[in-house]
Amino acid sequence: MTQIDGYKIEPGVNLTGANLRQVNLEGADLREAILCLANLYGANLARANLTGADLGQCRLATASLVEARLERANLWRCVLREADLQQAVLRKAALRQADLSGANLSGCDLTEANLQQSDLQGANLTGALLSHCNLQHADLRSAQLAQADLRFVDLSGAQLLDADLEGANLTGAKISEAQLAVVKNRHTIVMPDSLEGDDGFAAANFDDGHDAPFGIHAADRHTDHNAAVDAEVIVEVDADADADAEPAAPYQPAAQADAHAAEPMDADPEPEPEIS
């Protein structure tokens, strides 16, 4: 256990609302820690272990989370504007309504993450692993998604204007023709010939007769996105089909943040104040 600015830094520590602005926590072990509502603006969390940590409504704008481990972490409504998350691991992380605009998520593992209603406008997701992600109603305008793994991702209602999808793998994705019409490099997208199913959404039947596994993890990190796909895929073509989709249940923050979670969030938070 170490102490930084009077705060204990150890697994499971409760740092709710702590002011850790621009603090150096590189390589810190914060597994299962409670950091909801904390101010970590500009902090260095490169290679930190935040597995299972609660960062709900945490401020991490411009912070460094390069190669950080955030599996199953809660980042609900977290502000990560222009943060550096290169090669970070966020498998099954809860990022619903998170602000990731302008963030660097290149090479990031977001397999099975919940990014519903998140702001990814202008984000760099080059080569990111997003298979089986929930991106319903996410803002991906002008996002960089070249060579990204988007297999079986749910993009219902997502905004994709000017998103760069060069070489991205959209096998089995829930995406409409109208959405595809406004993306860049559409002709390079990996998507087998498709047919419309009864429900208008993506489905796949594998040769062994079993459903596809819900999670595809490290074994697929270096998958060749241009390789042949041994599956019969049906891709959504109905632009209005997502209207009937059942919305995901809202995330309930940790008990330590319950008193603050109900407070309304500003649509455009004010810039971080300078601390003298």
Image (cartoon, rainbow, N blue to C red):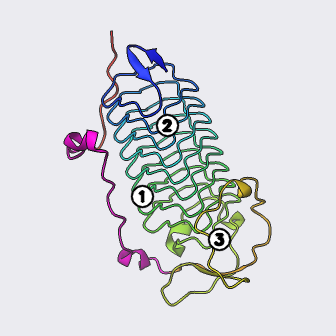
Are the two marked residues, 1 and 2, in contact with CB atoms closer than 8 angstroms?
Answer: no
For the magenta stretch, what is the residue range?
238-265
Amino acid type at mark 3:
Thr
Quarter where residue 80 is shown: top left
Q: Which residue is the extreme one toward the bottom? A: 198
Amino acid identity at mark 1? Gln
Name the residue at the top extreme.
276
Q: Secondary structure at mark 3?
A: loop
* Residue positioned 49% across, 21% down in the render: 1
Decide if residue 79 is on the left or right side of residue 152. left
Is 263 on the left-hand or right-hand side of 64?
A: left
The residue that mark 3 highlights is: 171
- The CA span between labels 3 and 2 is 34 Å
Tag 1 residue: 116
Query: Residue at left 57%, top 61%?
Result: 183
Circles 1, 3 touching at the beta carbon (< 8 Å): no
Tell me the crowding category of disc 1: few under 14, some 14 to 19, or many 20 or more residues within 10 angstroms, Cα based.
many
Which mark's residue is nearer the viewer, 1 or 2?
2
Q: Is residue 188 above or below residue 26?
A: below
Query: What residue did someone put label 2 on?
Result: 31
Which structural element holds mark 2? loop
Q: Would you place residue 10 above or below residue 141 in this image?
A: above
Q: Are marks 3 and 2 in contact (CB under 8 Å)?
A: no
The location of residue 224, given as percent across then percent down, is 78, 60
Answer with mark 1 or mark 2, whichever residue precedes in sequence: 2
